[in-house]
Image (spheres, grey):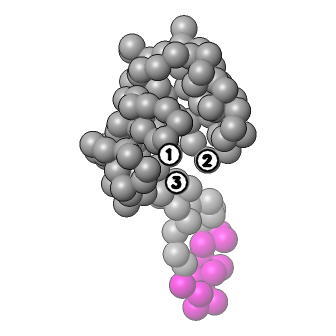
């Protein structure tokens, strides 16, 4: 979604001065969610979903550690049904659909995240 934040008078003034305008994008149109199986030497495998992620980063998740089965969906939200909880960091939230919530909460802390049990 692209939004401009200029009123008509400002736009006319800038155009009259010969300035080209490029719309400011408030959120990247290619952002979405990533579902994948997360596994590393410490934990997993767990079915997870991450939000606020682009397709290239999502598909790269399958190449990290022992992760697999990455799939991207634009303009979607991670399902809350069957979730055991979520770890929210400054970059994104990761929803877990498998695993022990208390162990996942500890792992979330190592990522400087905040754990929330599913309701």
Q: Does residue 112 appear to the left or right of 98 in the view shown? A: right
Which residue was labeled with disc 2?
Answer: 91
The residue shown at (59%, 76%) is: 12
Which residue was labeled with disc 1?
Answer: 52
- Element type where label 3 sits in the image: loop
State whether residue 3 appears in this view. Answer: no
Q: Is residue 70 depicted above or below 6 in this figure?
A: above
Image position, residue 66 (x, y; %): 38, 46
Determine the CA span between mark 3 and mark 1.
10 Å
Image position, residue 92 (x, y; %): 57, 42
Which residue was labeled with disc 3?
Answer: 27
Residue extending farthest to the bottom is 18
Determine the CA span between mark 2 and mark 3.
14 Å
State whether residue 13 appears in this view. Answer: yes
Image position, residue 110 (x, y; %): 69, 38
Magenta run includes residue 56: no
In the rendered structure, which disc, 3 or 1, sits on the residue that comes first in sequence? 3
Residue extending farthest to the front is 41
Q: Main secondary structure of the magenta part?
A: helix
Determine the CA span between mark 1 and mark 2.
8 Å
- Element type where label 2 sits in the image: loop
The residue shown at (54%, 8%) is: 119
Image position, residue 111 (x, y; %): 66, 41
Closest to the observer, 102 or 83: 102
Question: Do the residues under discs 1 and 2 have CB atoms within 8 angstroms?
Answer: yes
In the rendered structure, which disc, 2 or 3, sits on the residue that comes first in sequence? 3
């Amino acid at each position: 979604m692209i939004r401009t934040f200029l009123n008509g008078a400002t736009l006319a003034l800038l155009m009259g001065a010969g300035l080209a305008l490029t719309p400011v994008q408030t959120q990247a149109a290619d952002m979405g969610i990533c579902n994948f199986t997360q596994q590393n030497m410490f934990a997993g495998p767990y079915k997870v979903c991450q939000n606020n992620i682009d397709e290239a980063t999502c598909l790269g998740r399958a190449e990290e550690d022992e992760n697999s089965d990455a799939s991207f969906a634009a303009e979607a939200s991670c399902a809350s049904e069957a979730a055991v909880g979520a770890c929210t960091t400054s970059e994104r939230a990761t929803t877990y659909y498998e695993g022990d919530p208390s162990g996942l909460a500890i792992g979330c802390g190592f990522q400087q995240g905040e754990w929330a049990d599913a309701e």
